[in-house]
Image (cartoon, coloured by chain):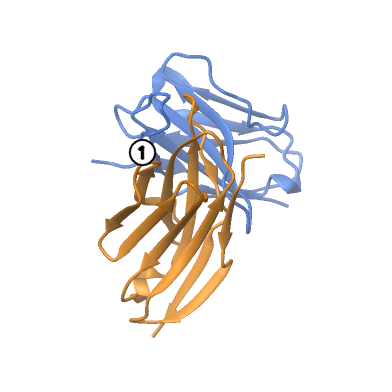
Chain colours: A orange, B blue
Amino acid sequence: KNQVEQSPQSLIILEGKNCTLQCNYTVSPFSNLRWYKQDTGRGPVSLTIMTFSENTKSNGRYTATLDADTKQSSLHITASQLSDSASYICVVSPGGGYNKLIFGAGTRLAVHP
Amino acid sequence: GAGVSQSPSNKVTEKGKDVELRCDPISGHTALYWYRQSLGQGLEFLIYFQGNSAPDKSGLPSDRFSAERTGGSVSTLTIQRTQQEDSAVYLCASSLGGTSGSYEQYFGPGTRLTVT
């Protein structure tokens, strides 16, 4: 069964600290992996998208990594800000001309002053 | 330009009533998706429209759910005889389309449906 598992479920960090969120997937075949940020009461917004040939991609203070062999991805947030408080969702797109995305349940991050 | 918009933002309805949720995609986007997000769960695919092709309805949970897309633009998701388990946030997304799965999907703010 195609699945996307994220950890931790929730995380609290202090402003200015770094953190890393994990994503494991069993989706096959695999086209690409995306990380989304979802603020409370809003729709998800894309942070990064990586194909199987890409190992890392950055978007400002956000850096995503991908190991297609072990089917693991991580999202690293550097020098966290209060505005980083949100849910971070790992999303995998299967290959084979199939446009349905498979979503993880998300990691809820709270950044405290 | 304008993003994806959805209306209403919140909807409270009584069990057994029908509801209609509306999505206005980004102009020029040929693909439109509906998702459901229950508390603590990942987004669940419901239905996918691509241009003039027949929609992919494989994610609709029951025959009480239906959706249409008029003129290749606005879409309406209809839930008939609502049940309490239908309470969730319903998200709409649009993209430039294609079937490669690589197109970016842009999400609306969602409609929070509460069935009492």
Residue A41 at least partly seen: no
Q: Is residue A33 above or below residue A12?
A: above
> Which quadrant of the figure has residue B29?
top left
Crowding around mark 1 (Cα neighbors within 10 Å: few <14, some 14 to 19, many 20+) is some
Left or right: residue A110 versus residue B67 is left
Q: Is residue A59 above or below residue B60?
A: below
Left or right: residue A61 versus residue A51 is left
Q: Identify the secondary structure beneath mark 1.
A: loop
At 61% from the left and 45% from the top, the residue drawn is: A3
x, y percentage for residue A37?
Answer: 41, 57
At 28% from the left and 57% from the top, the residue drawn is: A58
> Which quadrant of the figure has residue B67?
top right
Which image quarter holds the C terminus of chain A?
bottom left
The foreground one among A25 and A39 is: A25
x, y percentage for residue A70?
Answer: 52, 51
> Which quadrant of the figure has residue A19?
bottom left
x, y percentage for residue A16?
Answer: 33, 81
x, y percentage for residue B10?
Answer: 54, 51
The foreground one among A80 and B28 is: A80
At 39% from the left and 39% from the top, the residue drawn is: B105
Left or right: residue B55 versus residue A84 is right
Reading the image, the residue beneath label 1 is B104
Left or right: residue B15 versus residue A30 is right
The foreground one among B38 and A52 is: A52
Which image quarter holds the N terminus of chain A?
top right
Callout count: 1
As drawn, which residue projects farthest toward the front? A69
Residue A28 at least partly seen: yes
**Chain to which the residue tagged by mark 1 belongs:** B
Residue type at tag 1: Glu
At 45% from the left and 80% from the top, the residue drawn is: A13
